[in-house]
Amino acid sequence: MRKQTLRRLARFMRRAGIGLLFAVVAILAPCPVWTPEIFTWWQVPIVVLTLILYLGVVLFDTLFFDRYH
């Protein structure tokens, strides 16, 4: 692989790791009014959806970086 490709892959992995870290912290953070229903039906789905959207943006930036610069 070329050096630029490896650097881009490393940047993607670093940004994805930061997103995963924030997701774990958000899932484990207590809500002000915590019930199992809020955790199951609101907190986890919102965090997972946000993580999926963030990873999609990061992957798009990684794959199409050359086209915009």
Image: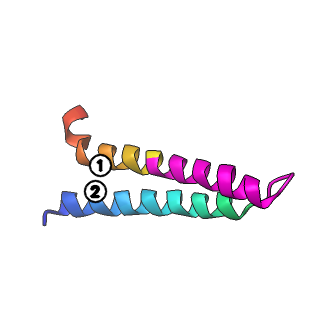
Residue found at x 33% / y 50%: 59
What's drawn in magenta, residue-wise? Answer: 30-52
Quadrant location, the C terminus: top left
**Rendering coords of residue 11 (x, y %):** 36, 58
Q: Earlier in the sequence, mark 2 or mark 1?
A: 2
**Rendering coords of residue 22 (x, y %):** 60, 58
Residue found at x 54% / y 54%: 48
- Left-right relation of 36 to 69: right
Can residue 46 be found in the magenta stretch? Answer: yes
- Left-right relation of 54 to 13: right
Q: Nearer the viewer, mark 2 or mark 1?
A: 1
**Rendering coords of residue 47 (x, y %):** 59, 52
Residue found at x 32% / y 43%: 61
Q: Toward which corner of the image does residue 8 lie, by quadrant?
A: bottom left
Residue found at x 50% / y 52%: 51
- Numbered label tally: 2
Q: Mark 2 points at which residue?
A: 8
**Please, what secondary structure does the residue beneath circle 2 have?**
helix
